[in-house]
Image: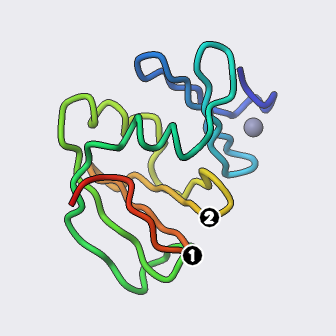
């Protein structure tokens, strides 16, 4: 499953396939050959992350960015599905970014993807 661009990156995390489209800047989620809703995928991949900080006025698509730390080894593997160095749009209201070993989440509306 990919969007047809040669530069898109496909990562498998357990049974979830993540397609990062470098052309569109978007993420696609698939499981068992079907599209997986973003909110479901984000909870499955990053649901056990711990909120460690909120950053204001960074180069985020939203007003601020929530910083999450992986809560497990699996969480660290989940992070690998986000190619580093840019923000990825997971859904119209949800942007994700990997910064070193941390997950940055930015959204115009305030949501939490993990505990804490
Ligand atoms: Zn693409």
44 relative to 50, above or below: above
| Residue 108: image tag | 1
Q: Looking at the rendering, in which quadrant would you find the C terminus?
A: bottom left
Residue 116 versus residue 66: which sits nearer the camera? 116
Direction from residue 103 to residue 19 in the image, left or right = right
Q: Are marks 1 and 2 in contact (CB under 8 Å)?
A: yes
Residue 39 versus residue 81: which sits nearer the camera? 39
Question: Looking at the image, is mark 1 or mark 2 earlier in the sequence?
Answer: 2
Question: What residue appears at the point 75 percent right and 47 percent down from the top-left corner?
Answer: 23
Q: Kindly identify which residue carries mark 2.
A: 93
| Residue 100: image tag | none
Direction from residue 30 to residue 103 in the image, left or right = left
The CA distance from mark 1 to mark 2 is: 6 Å
38 relative to 92, above or below: above
Residue 56 versus residue 113: which sits nearer the camera? 113
Q: Position of residue 17 (x, y in %)?
A: 55, 24
Q: How many marks?
A: 2
Question: What residue appears at the point 26 percent right and 48 percent down from the top-left corner?
Answer: 49
Badge 1: how crowded within 10 Å, few (<14), some, or many (20+)? some
Direction from residue 14 to residue 5 in the image, left or right = right
The quadrant in which residue 51 appears is: bottom left
Q: Can you name the residue that lies furthest to the bottom here? A: 57
Q: Can you name the residue that lies furthest to the top here? A: 32
Question: What residue appears at the point 67 percent right and 33 percent down from the top-left corner?
Answer: 8
Give the secondary structure at mark 1. loop
Q: Position of residue 80 (x, y in %)?
A: 39, 35
Q: Position of residue 21 (x, y in %)?
A: 68, 41
Tell me: is circle 2 under 8 Å from ligand 1. Answer: no
């Amino acid at each position: 499953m990919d969007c047809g661009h040669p530069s898109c990156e496909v990562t498998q995390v357990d049974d979830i396939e993540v397609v990062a489209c470098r052309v569109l800047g978007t993420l696609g989620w698939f499981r068992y050959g079907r599209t997986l809703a973003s909110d479901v995928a984000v909870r499955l991949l990053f649901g056990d992350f711990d909120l460690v900080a909120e950053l204001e006025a960074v180069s985020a698509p939203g007003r601020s960015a929530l910083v999450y730390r992986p809560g497990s080894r699996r969480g660290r593997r989940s992070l690998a599905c986000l190619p580093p160095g840019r923000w990825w749009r997971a859904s119209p209201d949800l942007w994700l970014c990997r910064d070193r070993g941390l997950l940055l989440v930015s959204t115009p509306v305030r949501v939490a993807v993990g505990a804490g």
